[in-house]
Each structure stands twice: as C-alpha cells, then as structure tokens.
Image: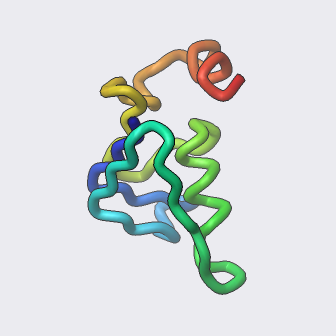
Amino acid sequence: MLTIRNLQAGYHDHIVVNLPDLTLQSGQTCLIKGLSGSGKTTLLQTLAGLLRPLKGCVLLGGQDLHQMTESQRDRVRG
C-alpha cells in the first residue's frame, strides 16, 4: 500500500507538487498526467525515494520511505 500525506515536493524551497492525501492499495493503479513542467517527474522521483519531500511523507506498507536508509530505499526500488 502507498500512502501520501500532505506531500509538497520541489527544488530549493520551490514547491512543484502539492498533494494533500492519497492512498493506493496493492495492485491498484493511478494515472498521473499534466502539462509539461507540471511536476509529474518530481512526484515520481519523490515516490521512488530519489527526492526528499519539502513537507509531508510517503508511506510504503506503513513505513516512511524517507526515514529509510539509502540502501533500504534502493532495495525497495529494486
């Protein structure tokens, strides 16, 4: 299960993504679409643990992705 809580992501305090709450169950799909430059890649990088959120959290199976070590996040992506 993927849970997003009060997520703000971007670069150098510039907020590109502002997503209040979202929960996806295992096997559930979600479409991410938007204009060029609207934050799709920033969101995906944050969900993959490659980019640290400016605010909020990303939970995978109830565990905060950004509280994991880098090697733990690597294993999750693998």
Extreme-bottom residue of the structure: 35
**Quadrant where the N terminus is found in the figure:** top left
Residue 46 spot, x, y in % from top left = 55, 47
User: 44 or 24: which is nearer to us?
Assistant: 24
Residue 40 spot, x, y in % from top left = 62, 67
Residue 51 spot, x, y in % from top left = 59, 44
Tell me which residue sits at (60%, 40%) in the image.
48
Q: How many marks?
A: 0
Tell me which residue sits at (67%, 21%) in the image.
74
Q: Quick check: 48 above or below 15? A: above
Q: Quick check: 32 above or below 28? A: below
Q: Which corner quadrant of the image does residue 22 belong to?
A: bottom left
Tell me which residue sits at (52%, 70%) in the image.
16
Q: Quick check: 9 above or below 75? A: below
Q: Quick check: 20 above or below 44? A: below
Lateral position of residue 71 relative to residue 26, left or right: right
